[in-house]
């Protein structure tokens, strides 16, 4: 990472940064996804509209809303989605009345657990509702027997917020991931190769045993986060490599403290499971880039007879283009009181906090002009994690 100094006051970018592609990469994390909406709002205010949005699970939902609306309507549609799924909770009045009283970590822990239990028992409006009777009493082989919740309402909500004709127009590339249940393979649905429909978005978020598998063209899919919870590798390893400015938005931090009790053990376990260790993935990619650039330099020095050899041509093809990448990490730092149920705590108060945290983290990051500058080092990769400095 280059030496950093915050110098930008006006965050609005007048000219496009020197990259062929601006990518927004959104991890899965349920209710924490409002953080991603805040990140996008700050990027939009800075005039940094993505050419490519890639998401997993709730990241796929946010990605579809972004790709499926005109730039001037995206923030409003994201706000509409997040307010809808946090609006008609029966505990909203409790949250409102107790906002001043529940300020300390102990009090907020209690309140968040209260709200999480409400989501489990009552479901979330426009998103999912519990099955009755229990799937244990449903006929084997039926949809009702394979999940605790019915999330069919999400399909209608997506249809009302996302213009899927726009999604598939090619204006903004959209990629979402899922897992093929039969093969166990990680699959990406991409507007360059597929016609994306609401089913593809729902498949990306079909986390078992909560939600049922989604059928697409005769195959059944679960949440992509079961295999990898970040689309980073899909973007940076794309066969059509481009100079890329990638904003990697993670809802789970791979780093954390040693747990001291069972509640903290459960929280830390979930963080490690879903963080996908994006810093490690970035380090691996940096090594790959170093090898690509080294191959390219070596190829230029070869005599003509060796350049035409099959081995040299293979190396040259893998190193072609000398593409460069800025990878900007925006990682949500959970508060102490949130606990292991933070991904299904759908209260309005927490949603607003997550949204604000994403917005503020992005504003702070964009104050560093180096984030938008083309890498000049040998491997052609700059990585940034301003909020962890």
Image (cartoon, grey):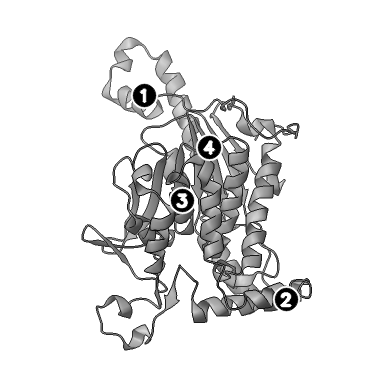
Please tell me whether mark 2 sits on a helix, a strand or a loop.
helix
| Residue 277 shows up from this direction | no
Q: Secondary structure at mark 1?
A: helix
- Horizontally, residue 181 falls left or right of residue 386, namely left
Provide the residue designation for mark 2.
97
* Label 3 sits on residue: 65
Labels 3 and 4 touching (C-beta < 8 A): no
Tell whether label 2 touches label 1 (CB within 8 Å): no
Find disc 4 in the rendering and name its residue: 49
Tell whether 83 sits left or right of 260.
Answer: left
Q: Earlier in the sequence, mark 4 or mark 1?
A: 4
Residue 153 appears left or right of 58:
left
Mark sitting earlier along the chain (1/2): 2
Q: Position of residue 314 (x, y in %)?
A: 31, 27
Q: Rounded to the nearest whole Å, what is the CA distance between mark 1 and mark 3?
A: 39 Å
Residue 121: percent from the left, percent from the top?
51, 82
């Amino acid at each position: 990472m280059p030496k950093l100094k915050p110098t930008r006051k006006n965050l609005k970018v007048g000219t496009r940064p020197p990259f062929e592609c601006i990518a927004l990469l959104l991890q899965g994390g349920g209710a924490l996804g409002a953080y991603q909406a805040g990140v996008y709002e700050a990027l939009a205010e800075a005039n940094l509209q993505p050419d490519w949005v890639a998401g997993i699970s709730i990241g796929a939902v946010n990605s579809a809303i972004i790709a499926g609306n005109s730039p001037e309507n995206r923030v409003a549609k994201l706000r509409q989605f997040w307010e809808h799924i946090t609006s008609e909770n029966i505990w909203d009045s409790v949250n409102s009345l107790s906002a001043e009283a529940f300020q300390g970590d102990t009090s907020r822990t209690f309140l968040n657990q209260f709200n999480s239990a409400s989501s489990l028992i009552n479901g979330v409006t426009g998103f999912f509702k519990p099955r009755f009777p229990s799937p244990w009493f449903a006929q084997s082989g039926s949809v009702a027997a394979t999940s605790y919740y019915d999330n069919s309402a999400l399909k209608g909500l997506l249809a009302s917020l996302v213009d899927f004709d726009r999604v598939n127009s090619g204006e903004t590339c959209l990629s979402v991931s899922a897992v093929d249940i039969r093969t166990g393979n990680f699959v990406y649905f991409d507007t360059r190769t597929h016609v994306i429909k609401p089913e593809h978005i729902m498949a990306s978020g079909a986390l078992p045993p909560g939600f049922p598998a989604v059928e697409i063209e005769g195959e059944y899919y679960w949440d992509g986060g079961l295999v990898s919870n970040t689309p980073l590798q899909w973007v940076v390893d794309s066969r059509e490599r481009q100079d890329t400015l990638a904003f990697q938005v993670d809802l789970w931090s791979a780093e954390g403290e040693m747990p001291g009790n069972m509640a903290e053990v459960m929280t830390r376990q979930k963080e490690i499971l879903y963080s996908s260790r994006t810093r490690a993935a970035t380090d691996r990619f940096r090594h790959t880039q170093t090898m690509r650039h080294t191959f390219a330099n070596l190829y230029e020095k070869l005599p003509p007879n060796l350049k035409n050899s099959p081995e040299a041509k293979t190396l040259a093809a893998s190193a072609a283009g000398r593409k460069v990448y800025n990878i900007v990490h925006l990682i949500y730092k959970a508060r102490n009181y949130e606990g292991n149920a933070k991904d299904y705590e759908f209260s309005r108060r927490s949603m607003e906090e997550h949204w604000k945290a994403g917005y503020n983290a992005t504003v702070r990051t964009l104050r560093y002009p180096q984030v938008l500058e083309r890498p000049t080092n040998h491997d052609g990769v700059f990585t940034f994690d301003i909020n962890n400095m």
